[in-house]
Amino acid sequence: MSGSDDTVPVSSSVPGEFSIIERLFAPLAGEGAFALQDDAALFTPAPGRQLVLTKDAIAEGRHYLAGDPPGDVARKLLRVNLSDLAAKGATPRGYLLSCAWSIETGYDWMAAFAAGLEADQKQYGLQLLGGDTIRVEGPSVFSLTAIGDVAEGEMVLRSGARPGDDLWVTGTIGDGALGLLAAQGELEFLPKPDNEYLVGRYRVPEPPVTFGQGLSSLASAALDVSDGLLADARHLCGASEVGIEIARDAVPVSPVVRTCLSANERYWETVLGGGDDYQILFSAPGATREKIKFLTQSSGTSACRVGRVTEDTGRVKLFDAAGKHLPIEPAGFQHF
């Protein structure tokens, strides 16, 4: 995590840039990072393995709220990238980190942020390899490049779905999107523990990393659900040149989300289109159902069959429990 020639004024309560790197981030550095004292890291994959690279950024006020705990912000940053690796069937190995700290960010906030990274490094078995740290006038922005690996030729693409395949999704959908509403005080009808549950899921997603490592031999196509289930289903359709049918009532939701839907069915729009799920949407031949069931048991991750792949190229269709075709409102998060 080399230094830069940033000239934005820095609060006197924060030590110098290189001191921050040495105190907070060098202890997180892995083999090949040279204690963050060089300009680059060295990483060699094991024989027969290929690297899988992904990058995501999060910004204050856009992907997390100003009052969110710094450790949770760091964990979310890392986990949204681990979600991408999981959807490719990859095992996480390391990451590069760029921190653009706002003028208001103090050292204690930075230290808590680093502690969040340390906790997740231990949980997911990867290490910091390098990056950069600067000051900016405006909200803080963090960018992370995650590095994983897969057996040669076994990365799961978006483009392999075929008509007749089953469509699956891991975990539960809607917790993150409704969690943002809860964090903004818009779900006050819920009991406090339910609100806290949803806020927690918004702040710290739970990507199915172990499950993802077993996808290569099962899934024909996969991607992580970050923009919203329906939007990401469209992405899969486009890449694979297929259609998709989804049974709305088969979409897995948590008990708290079910409570919200019982109170007002309009929350389905948020559940299916709000994003921030960081689960895996994947297609697989019907012959793999038992193997997928075994993978859910061995990984401790649930997966539900929610629909099927069709020949209706580019079309995502949604049906209710009675088989009625439901209109799909414009859904899915977009930056532009």
Image (cartoon, grey):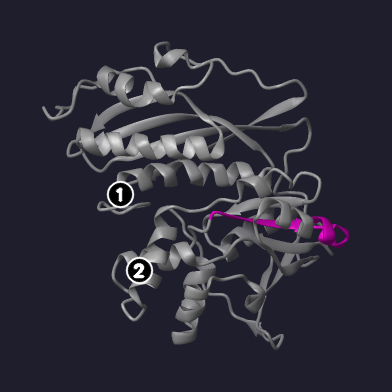
Q: Image point 77% across, 37% down: which residue?
A: 154
Residue lying furthest right: 287
Residue lying furthest bottom: 322
In the image, residue 170 above or below residue 326 = above
Which residue is tagged 2?
182
Where in the figure is residue 273, as x and y percent of width and height?
51, 67
Left or right, 71 with respect to 51, comes to: left
Q: Which mark is residue 69?
A: 1
Q: Which mark is residue 31?
A: none
Q: Quadrant of residue 196?
A: bottom left
Residue 284 painted magenta: yes
Q: Judge depth for marks 2 and 1 and give the one in front.
A: 1
Where in the figure is residue 188, as x and y percent of width and height?
31, 77
Please name the amino acid that badge 2 sits on. Ala
Closest to the observer, 95 or 221: 95
Where in the figure is residue 226, as x and y percent of width and height?
53, 55
Q: Quadrant of residue 310?
A: bottom right
In the image, residue 142 above or below residue 220 = above
Q: Rounded to the nearest whole Å, what is the CA distance between mark 2 and mark 1? A: 16 Å
Tell me where the magenta segment starts and ends, as one range. 278-291
